Every structure is written in C-alpha cells, then in structure tokens.
Amino acid sequence: MSAKAAIVRNLAFWHWYPEILVEGLTAEQLRWQPEGQDTSINFAIWHSYRAADEICHGLVMQRPSVYATENWEQRLPVGVKGATPFGNGLARDQIAQLDFDPAKLTAYAAAVGRSLTDWVSNVSDEEASKEVALPFFATVYPGYERMSKLEAVAFFAIAHTAEHLGEVQLIKGLQGMRGAPL
C-alpha cells in the first residue's frame, strides 16, 4: 500500500469514527465538561474537524473550507468562535454553550473527510511534497513550523483528530460510559 493510500484509508476512518462515539448520547452528555477542564464532547469534535477543515483547505490547498462552501455555518452555528475559526481561546462557559445536533456534527466531519480524501487521492507527488509554513507552531512545537502539504494533512486531519477523539472517549468514561466500542 502506498503512503497516499494509507493516508486516504486513515482519513476515511477518522472522519467516520465520531458517528459511533456520539451514538445515543444526550445533549447534556455532549455538553458536559469535566471539573476543572474546559472541553466537552461537542467542543472536541467540532474543534477537531473545524481545525482540519480550515488549516488543510486554507493553508495547504489554498481554497475555501468545507464549512464555508457547503453552508455548514447555518447547520452548525457558533456564536463566539474564539481566537481562531475553530475555537482556540474559548472560555469554559463559552464552550458549555456549544449545542450541536450530533447527526449534523458527524455529517460535517464526514464532509471534511470526503474533501480531504479527494485531494489526497488526486494530488500530484510534486504538489504534495511542497512545503507550507505553520508559523503558529514555532514556539509551541519547535521543528514543526514547516511541513510538506501531505504531511500537514496527515498531521491535522489524522493525528490532531485522533488526539481530540481520545478526549471524547475520556469524557465519556468520566461520565460512566464506555469510551470506545472495543
């Protein structure tokens, strides 16, 4: 299996997986925040896919996000977005206000995944290997302030997503539920 095929397979998984993580959860469970922590299931999922969407489409592909082109702002309205379009800097009480229909949230994740999968499947090796600057990483993750376009898609749409879906599983566990289906 080629590296591109492996990334496509992982994109398909990580953009489908939230469906089983939110299955059967109530609005209260989706908004619940652990004591002393800001995040919630709603926020972790929304933030993860909004970040992948904005960074991969805007920075890597240099085109508008799925959120913008497919009218997701109407389907997943967010009053206050924070310092970034994907919620960095939101306060605990602002995160607590995020109230999404889980079917719409997972449909958005899937839409982002389809767009990214299409790009990875069709991008030339030359284009995929071009570097992009990630200046916001310079002080936080030294050595990762430049990546190839393909590496950036894998980083933000797979690794970053997996990190936040791990948070979802932890939050479910803290609420007395099984985190993952395994």
Image (cartoon, helix red, strand yellow):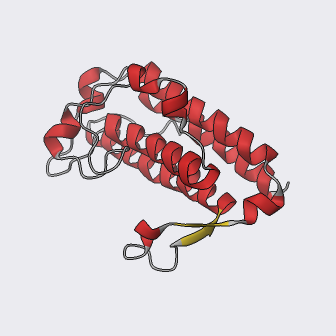
49 sits to left or right of 130: left
32 sits to left or right of 161: left
Classify residue 73 by image quadrant.
top left
11 sits to left or right of 75: right
What residue sits 37% from the left and 20% below the top?
101
* Total marks in image: 0
Classify residue 173 by image quadrant.
top left
What residue sits 60% from the left and 43% below the top?
63
What residue sits 26% from the left and 36% below the top?
175
Classify residue 148 by image quadrant.
bottom right
Q: Is residue 40 visible?
A: yes
What residue sits 34% from the left and 24% below the top?
100
In front: 169, or 115?
A: 115
88 sits to left or right of 23: left
Q: How far across and how far down the image is residue 103, in percent? A: 46, 20
Q: How far across and how far down the image is residue 11, in percent? A: 65, 44
In front: 56, or 100?
A: 56
Q: Quadrant of the N terminus?
A: bottom right
Q: Is residue 87 above or below residue 23?
A: below
